[in-house]
Image (cartoon, rainbow, N blue to C red):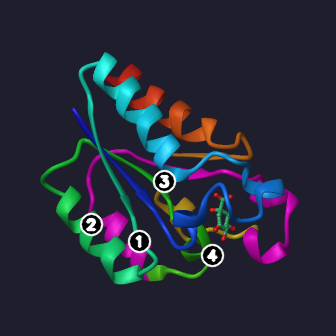
Amino acid sequence: NVIYVLNGPNLNLLGKRQPEIYGYETLADVQAKLETKAAQSGFTVEFFQSNHEGAIIDKIHEARDKANGIIINPAAFTHTSVAILDALNAFESPVVEVHISNVHKRESFRHHSYVSLRADGVIAGLGTFGYVAALDYFINLS
Ligand code: DQA
């Protein structure tokens, strides 16, 4: 029961970056919350953030034989990356796409997601609770 939680560019600045949109919680806070919840349910989360597309792709490849699911907030790569979509298409277990903000309420370039072509579920606009809800989905599956 291993879930990879992958975060894309600029999410290392969560809590400091446009808090009116993304809130004041840091990525370390999110990680701690997920690790606690996972441990209570016999799950392990592998938490990862990178500003580099290739590093995220490498991590998705690693997940192919290490993870039972992926929770991914691809951040801006959501709207640009065919390569991340292709990597996720080579991953055979469930994928949940998370966005902290409601991308559909924002600029039109945020309305299209390459990753949604692969994701089994998409959560947007629930703030950092979206990650918790996604983990709950995996816990309920098991
Ligand atoms: C985001 C939304 C994206 O459009 C944006 O580029 C991000 C964060 C979100 O979590 O709301 O960096 O994925």
Direction from residue 70 to residue 65 in the image, left or right: left
115 shown above or below 93: below
Tell me the number on the disc at residue 119.
3
> Which residue is at a point 40% across and 24% down the rendered structure image?
37
Where ligand 1 lies, by quadrant? bottom right
Q: Earlier in the sequence, mark 3 or mark 4?
A: 4
Amino acid type at circle 4 is: His
Q: Earlier in the sequence, mark 4 or mark 1?
A: 1
Instruction: Check the picture and name the quadrant holding the C terminus.
Output: top left
Would you name the residue on which mark 1 appears?
50
Q: Position of residue 20 (x, y in %)?
A: 84, 55
Would you name the residue on which mark 4 appears?
79
**Measured Cα–Cα span from mark 3 to mark 2:** 17 Å
> Which residue is at a point 70% across and 65% down the rendered structure image?
17
Quadrant in the rendering for residue 63: bottom left
Inspect this view and state whether residue 120 appears. Answer: no
Q: Secondary structure at mark 1?
A: loop
Tell me the number on the disc at residue 59.
2
Label 4 or label 1, whichever lies nearer to me, is 1
Label 3 or label 4, whichever lies nearer to me, is 4
Provide the residue span drawn in magenta: 83-110
Q: Secondary structure at mark 3?
A: loop
**Measured Cα–Cα span from mark 4 to mark 1:** 16 Å
Q: Position of residue 9 (x, y in %)?
A: 52, 73
Tell me the number on the disc at residue 5.
none
Q: Secondary structure at mark 4?
A: helix
Ligand 1 within 8 Å, label 3 CB: no
